[in-house]
Amino acid sequence: MAIGAVSFDVDGVLVDASRRLSICLNGGSVDWSCFLDCGKLALDLPKSRYIDLAARLHGRGHRVVVVTGRPEYMRRCTEAQLRSYGVPFDELYMRPQGDHRQDHLYKADAIARLIKSGVRIWAHFDDNAETAKALNAIGIDAVLAY
């Protein structure tokens, strides 16, 4: 029997990264080395709407899985940030070293692998419309979070 879970993205869903993003714009493009710098996570703010939802679901016995496009080298600082904001999570899936695919391709693949491992994702919350479309295409209900 599949294990049920709800999954959440980090930046834009559980975390308001708009201040970090604004200082990492370079001529209209994102300077990813700046944006993905653990030292800049202090600029972020918690998004209590989705953190509260994750806490309610977790408190009712649902598994909470975090699937983020942040790279694996940010694991420690991401876990610390999520814990400091009170985000309950059972698992954290991060982009592997060297994986430079677009976010929607990476997340659809990561969630498909979760499903193959026996985890049933009831819904995924993300702020990227392309990710929502990609997940819908593989049968996952995706909620666009703003």
Image: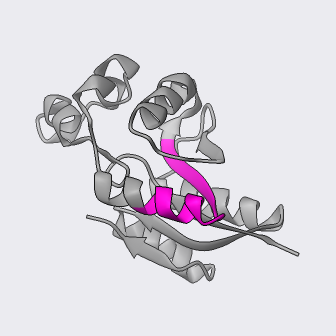
* Magenta stretch encompasses residue 77: no
Q: Residue furthest right?
A: 1
Residue in front for this viewpoint, 123 or 48: 48
* Quarter holding residue 62: bottom right
Image location (x, y in percent) of residue 73: 56, 24
131 lies above or below 92: below
Image location (x, y in percent) of residue 92: 61, 43
Image location (x, y in percent) of residue 146: 25, 64
Give the left or right position of residue 18, taking residue 121 as reference. Answer: left
Q: Residue at x 14, y 36 (%)?
A: 22
92 lies above or below 20: below
Residue in front for this viewpoint, 32 or 66: 66
Q: Residue at x 47, y 75 (%)?
A: 142
Residue in front for this viewpoint, 57 or 100: 57
Q: Residue at x 62, y 31 (%)?
A: 97
By what rule are the colours in the image chosen? one colour
Q: Which stretch appears magenta?
A: 53-69
